[in-house]
Image (cartoon, rainbow, N blue to C red):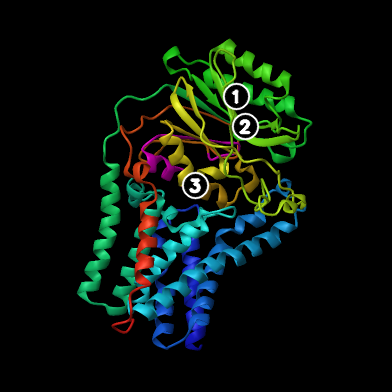
Amino acid sequence: MTASRRDLVLSAASGLVLGAAFLPAPLGWLAWFAFVPLLSALERRLGAGEGPRSWYALGYVGGFAFFLSGTHWIALLSDVAMAVPPLKYAGWVLAGAYLANFWALAVLLAGWLARRSGIPARWTFVVAMMAVEEFRGAGDLGFPWFQPGYTQSVLPPLGLAALGGVTLVTLWVLLLNAAARGWWARRNAVSAVIAIAVLAAGAGGGAWVRSRPLPATTGPAIGLIQGNIAGEIKWSGRHQGEIIARFLQLSDSALAGRPPADRPVMVIWPETATGSYLRKQLEQSITLARWASGRGVAILSGYADYSYDAEGKPLPWNAAGMWLADGHLSPTYAKRHLVPFGERMPFQSLFPALGKLEFGQAEWMPGGGPVVFRGAIGAFSTLICFESIFPGLARADVLAGSRCLVVVTNDEWFGRSAAVHQHAAMAPFRAVENGVPLLRCANTGLTQVIDAHGRVVASAPAFEPAVLTARVPPALPGRTPWTRWGDWPGALSLAVLVALLFVRRTTRAA
């Protein structure tokens, strides 16, 4: 095998190893050295005098291996999720092919910076990948799902998120890979000490942050209702009465036999729980209002909703709101960040004709901003499904006064794939970043209660009807550094990248 082909194999190995770190298994530690083969190949190509096209190809192969393995669940999507089900296979490959360009761009940028500055590529890769990850998570097509830091959701470095969000955890993962590559290249005591120091800083620092004691008091009890409604039933339009009856029966079971002190003050239903315009269909809304007022228990639910513009055109939303304990209705929250191609065709503001293309997307309208609900559990806000992967949305809610995050989602689209676990693994970061508890209610699971340190303190079995009752964990007092300062690691990385543009080679890149 030629050296060039061996480099491509090494790059693909990096992609596959990092992909394994995102599987529903305790393999997050694989991310600590996943990039080392790719970095070894890049530094060899730089040393051999190969050029930008070679670097780009190297990054593309690794990125394609990573994103194709990571997004394998696209091929497992429920047929209900797409108007033309066979398109999901093409969508899987196209998604991997598109996302691979981000790795390719990071490797290209790292190689160029290394050649220009003389700094080893393993270190310029850290800055380049951080900048590219910022870009990948932004805009209409923003998809920060596979940011490397998310591999640490059950490991001590999760605690770093309180200081600088998932971006800081990603920075630590990349620095550790660079240090590990340095040790592998040199095999001396200095490089070993550097690698051990970086490892200890992340693991020890994260554990130290999470050792801060939570307030002793807990909030009132709540009930999370996991209906486990199949998509073909939910969206058929023929079973709405049965679906509502199931949710109400499960809600009653959350209250049954409990002493007043342990009785839930609110039940939470998942995203678009009944598949109907729950508030607009008067009989259904009255049914929920009577249940809530008759038991003195609020219902928070996701539902489809709509309003009208000045010309009378309907504006549909993916929404959430409450039937209060006295039967009245709360304000409605409308989902702000919609799933591209699933809930809305992207770039319609620039090219309105794109909205006429039909791939089975829902064509919701985006909501305006945070909505902080006031209820028996205090001030809380709602994130709907895809929104929970965007740190900035949760931060905006907490800055607006929320002291508890509620995520309602319908992961039934994903079936029994790794996506269910990947999506849930991002929720602890939102809790840790802002120092507040998070209640996650999913149609098929994973339904969880997460404390302010990112620990799952209660969970329901997935893929079956379930009721999860628990007390709302306390929030940490004050605001975390992340909530106060936002994505400073991303801004710092971009600043370092700009600074490197002015650094000229003084030594040969190793």
Which residue corresponds to mark 3? 390
In the image, taking residue 480 as reference, residue 381 lies left or right, namely right
Q: Is the Cβ of the residue at disc 1 closer than 8 Å to that at disc 2? A: yes
Which residue corresponds to mark 1? 250
In the image, taking residue 201 as reference, residue 146 lies left or right, namely right
- Counting residues from the start of the chain, the first of labels 1 and 3 encountered is 1
Q: Which residues are magenta?
A: 424-446
Q: Which mark is residue 227?
A: 2
Q: Is residue 428 magenta?
A: yes
Q: Amino acid at mark 1?
A: Leu
The image position of residue 150, as x and y in percent, is 44, 53
Disc 3: CA contacts within 10 A as few (<14), some (14-19) or many (>=20): many
- Counting residues from the start of the chain, the first of labels 1 and 2 encountered is 2
Vertical placement of residue 167 versus 271, above or below: below
Name the residue located 58 percent from the left edge and 12 percent from the top edge.
293
Name the residue located 47 percent from the left edge and 60 percent from the top edge.
133
In the image, taking residue 351 as reference, residue 466 lies left or right, namely left
Can residue 307 be seen?
A: yes
Vertical placement of residue 186 versus 134, above or below: below
Q: Nearer the viewer, mark 1 or mark 3?
A: 3
Name the residue located 43 percent from the left edge and 42 percent from the top edge.
430
